[in-house]
Amino acid sequence: MDQEKIILSRVVTPQGELQLQQLVEIDEKNHPVYEIIFNGVFLMASYNELSEKELATLAIEPLASQWQDIRVLVGGLGIGYTLRAALDCDGIQAVDVVEIEEHIISWAKGIFSELNGYACFDPRVNLIKMDLGDYILKTEKTYDSIILDVDNGPTWLALGSNQRLYEKPALLKIKDLLRHGGVFTVWAAQQCPAFQKRLEEVFGRTELITVQDADRSGPSADYFIYRTRAFENYQNSGQTLRSKKLIQKEGFNFGFDPEACMQCQGKCCNGDRGNIFVNSKEIEAISKFLGIEVSGFIEEYLIKISYEFSIREIKTDKNYACIFFDNERNRCSIYPVRPNQCRTFPFWSYYKDKPEEVARECPGVSLCER
C-alpha cells in the first residue's frame, strides 16, 4: 500500500520535472522523511543515509591516514549526506560538488540543511552548478578522490545523457583527474558486470562492496559501491601491478609498489604465526579508535610477550591472521591507526639481507638489479 505523501515542490527544469515530496511519517531520529522524484522516477530519499555516507568514507578512508590536504570531487549533491561524510573525514582540504539542478542545491541549503549538518555552508565546499559530464571534460583541476552519485547507477539513469559517465572515454578522463593512488567510488542500486569490466580495463582491480540501507517498502535493501584506484602505467595483463615509481629506502635492495596492496588480499596480515608489537601510544590510539577503555582493549586484543604487548592472532583454515584483519573485505579494520610495525612493512631490518624472502611474501616488492 502506498504511503501518503505531501508534494512540497514540483518544478520544470531544462532537464525535466523535479518533485520534492514528504512522507506523512518521521524517521527514527524524529526527522521528516523526504523523497525526490525526477521525471516520474525515484531519484533519492532522506532514508538512504547509510549508503550515501559510506560512499564517501570508502573513497577517502584509504587516503586519510597517509595524505594531508585531500581534495575531493563529488558528482551529485542530493540530500547532502555524501558531502557531510566527506567533510567529516580527516585531512580534507576542499570538496567540489557538481550538481546540475539549482533546485537541489537550494533544497540542500534549506530544507535538508539540518539533515546534512549544514554541509553546504562549510568554507571548504565549492558548489558548482553544471552537468558533471561537461565538468569532467573541461576541468583542469586534479583530485585525490572522485565520488560519483548522479544516478541510481549505470543501469538506472536519472538522465539519458549521463550514460557517457559510465563509458570508457569518461572513465579514462576521470583517471587522469585523479592523483596517483587516488580513489574513485560509484554508488549503484543494482550490480552491473559490464560497468565493472570497464572499470577494470581502465583502472585495474575494482571492488564491488555491498552496503545495506533502509528501504521504506520493506526490510533493508542491498546497494552497491564500486571502488577502484588510479595508478600510473596500469596494463591489464593479469600480472602483479606495477607503477612507474617504486618506494625505495637506503640499505634495502628492493623497491615497494603500494599499488599491489589493492590485489594481494592481506598477505602481510596472514600467514605463519608472528608478533605484531604495539607501544603505549599505539595502544591508546587504537583503543580510542575502537571506542573502548585501554584496560579492556589490552585484555581482549593483546597478549604479553616478555615485557611487550603484541596483537592477538586468530587461527584460520590454513594459517593465522591478525585479529583486526577483515577477511570479508580483505583489509585492516584499524588501518588509520595501525601500528608502526605495519606502517613500515616491508622495510624491516630483518629483510635487509633477505630481499628474496620478502619478495616471495609480498607481491608489491621488486628486487633491484645487482
Image: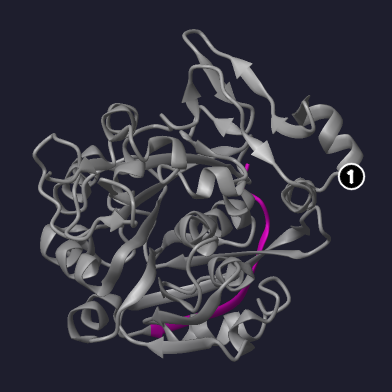
Residue 368 lies in the magenta stretch: no
Q: Which residue in the structure is indicated by mark 1?
A: 293
Give the quarter of the figure containing the C terminus.
Answer: top left
Of residue 229 and residue 323, the one placed in the foreground of this image is 323
Left or right? Give the position of 138 relative to 273.
left
Residue 10 lies in the magenta stretch: yes
Q: What residue lies at 51% left-to-right and 74% top-to-bottom?
A: 68
Please identify the dominant SS of the magenta region. strand
Left or right? Give the position of 340 relative to 301.
left
Q: Is residue 52 above or below residue 18?
A: above
For the residue labelled by badge 1, is the local secondary structure a helix, a strand or a loop?
Answer: loop
User: Percent from the top left, x then y, of residue 292?
Assistant: 85, 44
Give the quarter of the figure containing the N terminus.
Answer: top right
Left or right? Give the position of 162 relative to 344.
left
User: Percent from the top left, x then y, of residue 105?
Assistant: 51, 84
Q: Is residue 227 above or below residue 304?
A: below
Amino acid type, label 1: Glu
Q: Which residues are magenta?
A: 1-12
Quadrant hosting residue 13: bottom left
Q: What residue lies at 87% left-to-right and 44% top-to-bottom?
A: 294
User: Percent from the top left, x then y, of residue 283?
Assistant: 77, 46
Of residue 270 and residue 155, the one placed in the foreground of this image is 270
Left or right? Give the position of 248 relative to 298.
left
User: Percent from the top left, x then y, of residue 302?
Assistant: 76, 30
Quadrant hosting residue 367: top left
Of residue 370 and residue 249, the one placed in the foreground of this image is 370
Q: Residue lying farthest top?
A: 317
